[in-house]
Image (cartoon, coloured by chain):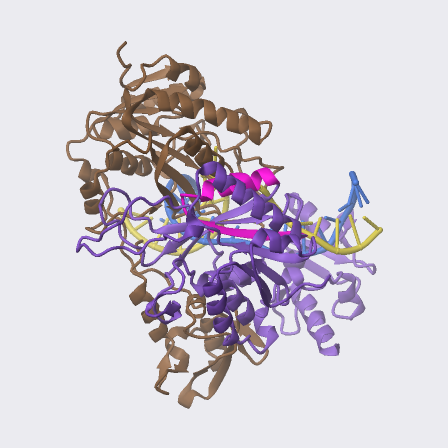
Chain colours: A purple, B brown, C yellow, D blue
Amino acid sequence: MSLPLDTLLDGDCVETMARLPAGSVDLVFADPPYNLQLGGDLLRPNASRVAGVEEEWDRFADFAAYDAFTRAWAEAARRVLKPDGALWVIGSYHNIHRVGAILQDLGFWLLNDIVWRKTNPMPNFKGTRFTNAHETLLWCARSAESRPTFNYAAMKTLNDDLQMRSDWMLPLCVGPERLKTDGRKTHPTQKPESLLYRVILATTRPGEVILDPFFGTGTTGAAAIRLGRHYIGCERDPDYIAAARARLAGVTPVEDPALLITPSRRSEPRIPFGAVLEAGLLRPGDTLHGGRRGAIEATIAADGSLCHGDQRGSIHKIGAAAQGVASCNGWTFWHYRDEAGQWQPIDALRERIRATAKGRD
Amino acid sequence: MSLPLDTLLDGDCVETMARLPAGSVDLVFADPPYNLQLGGDLLRPNASRVAGVEEEWDRFADFAAYDAFTRAWAEAARRVLKPDGALWVIGSYHNIHRVGAILQDLGFWLLNDIVWRKTNPMPNFKGTRFTNAHETLLWCARSAESRPTFNYAAMKTLNDDLQMRSDWMLPLCVGPERLKTDGRKTHPTQKPESLLYRVILATTRPGEVILDPFFGTGTTGAAAIRLGRHYIGCERDPDYIAAARARLAGVTPVEDPALLITPSRRSEPRIPFGAVLEAGLLRPGDTLHGGRRGAIEATIAADGSLCHGDQRGSIHKIGAAAQGVASCNGWTFWHYRDEAGQWQPIDALRERIRATAKGRD
DNA sequence: ACGGGCAATGAATCGCAAC
DNA sequence: CGTTGCGATTCATTGCCCG
């Protein structure tokens, strides 16, 4: 059975997911009902009424009912995930702890909890609590053994060359982005595309498949299309389905796929040090220098090993031994004198080989 | 039986709390073990070893054992709380969801989850996840019917006359505040007093009683004394007890608690260029122009880097490289064509984001 | 005394392909 | 399956040493 890519599937997500092949999806993004347990109407200081979440889909008899619901969709999601797949869930303090504990019990492995800090949260009108200014996302692998995708370099670049933190400052979905029907919001909890942009860019690769069991008005689909990923959506409500279909018809992907990938050293093919010799960029008998002011010397052998005193081994092993440390990246530790007489790390020679290799294919 | 005020009680907290009278305490602040489940050593890029939490008290056989432990202390805490009393718990993604779900199951009523955003978290050294830059606190009433104390005005004043949000930006406990024994940290997870100041100032009144079942080196006691509240601490470890007693002997109440609090910084939030993409103000594949008459072109990648010929990097780096100069402010160098067809510096888009992002800190 | 440079460090579930 | 070895990977802050 093949996957219904870029499709919105009408119906209950547990049943829908059960019909999909096991181990077929790269990422699940879930925005389940929060079980808000709201009481009566909430009035602003000017006596206007706050439009809360009053839909039938957010009403559960008790915690046990909510837990059973959570366990059902989470198990179904786990079944369709590939072994190295991952799951994101978004929630608030009303539900996220129940969800988190259940995910752990099911074998999911928490990788991070992410705080979505809202730039423009709704104030606490009654002055009885702290302004509830954030929501929480859980990012977890299918199991502790999974090797989930994390585009570290892309996140670092996106954050001006600093590691992306676990707290994200993003605005609510308002203005033109917010879908409206007859002047009222189409969906009470539409998420901003910026949130999904970051989730998808961080934890999937172009062309992969993202399933959203609570598709709503299709924010996940919109971000997936833009970023060159495939989506599968589940949704029961015909109004949401119609709104999502109309919305997604107008979304176009980025044209140049190269723009979707951040180059990282990790994903580059490996080049053994011997290739530098074979390319004639260094010769057996040449001397490399490492350490402070290049005080550590080593001689290159014909097989690409280094000789330092009576020790002999790889550039990494000798670099570590010469410094008396456990490990060492020989590519950045050892230096040679280039044509202009400048000291350069031998990594520059590896780069040169990579550049010519790319030119060939 | 009268309460042992301002006392550190030696022994297991469940047994100790069981000996205290029911309904006698105004607030419980709990910093339980997080059940970190660490693997082997973690080395920094410079090969130095990260001092993790290796203490026996953070080791549990499995989730079930941790849950049983949590249920035991939470039930004991609930018994000693007054009907309108409240509980704070701090934790990380490793444990906080289990704790939160158990508290809900026991009848506690969640009021807020608070995010302690660390100004100076430890980086993710291996580049495998988002920097774990926050911890979570749960604030809950003893029951849904409780009327817990919340000093709304004090919090608003503390926050420059804006409602205090659910995300707090505070530094780690380092420097002179961090207790040391023979040059090494006395306790692996000592919390900053600033965190306890805010908790106690927000949710207790002067003269009330705060119980801390995991007293450690007594941060809760120190903040309580300073703020004119009473503390009761439970602790098993004799080294922690000795350190706490010595510490608390030197703490004196202050007359004006407002003087204790450092106002939060109001510096402009830093906006990375990636935020402009996530906000949809520009899109991957769009072209920016710079230099005289916009002769220099560059294409935007999905991660917020610019592509110019075979070069790729930040708006600043590519701006500098394209001009052949050492440095460049990309925000003012690069221009885009706005809705009216006018060329505008991309800094205008950053301003637009700032205008909506009235974010604190 | 002041400043620059360098080292230390913080609740951390921290790699992966080839053999 | 386990073992081996390449080689990728850090931010904010404090404090000490030295000029």
Q: Residue at x 38, y 20 (%)?
A: B234
Tell me if residue A86 is in the magenta stretch: yes
Residue A333 pos. (x, y %): 64, 56
Which residue occupies the foreground of this view, A355 or B85?
A: B85
Furthest-top residue in this view? B1
Residue B310 pos. (x, y %): 59, 78
Tell me: B228 left or right of A176.
left
Furthest-left residue in this view? B255
Residue B67 pos. (x, y %): 51, 29
Asked if residue A136 shows in the view, the reply is no
Tell me: A271 left or right of B313.
right
Q: Residue at x 43, y 87 (%)?
A: B294
**Residue B150 picture quarter:** top left
Instruction: Give the magenta range.
Output: A83-106
Q: Which quadrant is the N terminus of chain A positioned in?
A: bottom right
**Residue B249 picture quarter:** top left
Q: Which quadrant is the C terminus of chain A positioned in?
A: bottom right
